């Protein structure tokens, strides 16, 4: 049986830091399902369809990566894909407290689903979707920080 992990996020937009987490996750799991969260309360720059499309286009050549939209509980998404793990990336110690709380809550909802943390590559420890949105809306160059499908959409805004 293939070992599957869910990598959840808003991905508004997906960054090369996210891509790095997926690549690292593929060293640990046979399949990664990227769960693009539909959470309009966050006020995303891109709607869920655009975010879903950017993630799909980024991993189009990767057969062991699937992409799904979801709203609701992450453990329900994991059940739907028969995933036994949640993949999360850590950029700095400041990420750990929030991620620890989320992992603990998910374990409370379903003790059979583990959370696996991978450290971001040093090149991406400062990269966040929020920074990408802010820099790009002010005309800054983010081309070295996002995949091509994101850059195309940012340039078209």
Image (cartoon, helix red, strand yellow):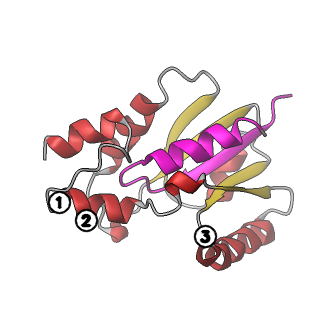
What element does badge 2 sit on? helix
Q: Residue at x 27, y 40 (%)?
A: 151
Q: Which residue is mark 2?
A: 134
Which mark, residue 92?
3
Relative to the observer, which residue lies in front, 73 or 119? 119
How far apart in space, not on screen, are marks 2 and 3 (Cα)? 20 Å
Q: Earlier in the sequence, mark 1 or mark 3?
A: 3
Q: Please tell me how crowded label 2 is: few (under 14), some (14-19), or many (20+) other residues with Cα within 10 Å.
A: few
Q: Is residue 26 above or below residue 93?
A: above
* Mark 2 touches mark 1? (CB < 8 Å): yes
How far apart in space, not on screen, are marks 2 and 1 (Cα)? 5 Å
Q: Seen in the image, is 64 located left or right of residue 11?
A: right
What element does badge 1 sit on? helix
Residue 45 coordinates in the image, percent (x, y) = 26, 58
Which mark, residue 137?
1
Q: Residue at x 81, y 29 (%)?
A: 2
Is residue 142 highlighted in magenta?
A: no
Instruction: Tell me where residue 39 sits by quadrant.
Output: bottom left
Relative to the observer, which residue lies in front, 26 or 47? 26
How far apart in space, not on screen, are marks 1 and 3 (Cα)? 25 Å
Residue 48 coordinates in the image, percent (x, y) = 35, 49
* Mark 2 touches mark 3? (CB < 8 Å): no
In the image, which residues are magenta? 1-27
């Amino acid at each position: 049986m293939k070992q599957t992990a869910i990598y959840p996020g808003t991905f508004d937009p997906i960054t090369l830091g996210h891509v790095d987490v997926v690549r690292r996750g593929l060293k640990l799991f046979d399949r990664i399902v990227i769960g693009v969260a539909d959470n309009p309360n966050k006020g995303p720059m891109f709607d869920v369809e655009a975010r879903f499309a950017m993630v799909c286009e980024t991993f189009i050549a990767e057969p062991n990566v699937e992409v799904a939209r979801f709203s609701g509980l992450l453990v329900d998404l994991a059940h739907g894909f028969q995933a036994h793990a949640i993949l999360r990336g850590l950029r700095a110690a400041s990420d750990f407290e929030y991620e620890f709380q989320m992992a603990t809550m998910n374990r409370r909802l379903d003790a059979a689903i583990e959370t696996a943390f991978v450290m971001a590559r040093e090149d991406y420890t400062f990269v966040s979707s929020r920074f990408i949105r802010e820099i790009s809306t002010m005309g800054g160059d983010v081309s070295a920080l996002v995949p091509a499908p994101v850059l195309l959409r940012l340039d078209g805004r």
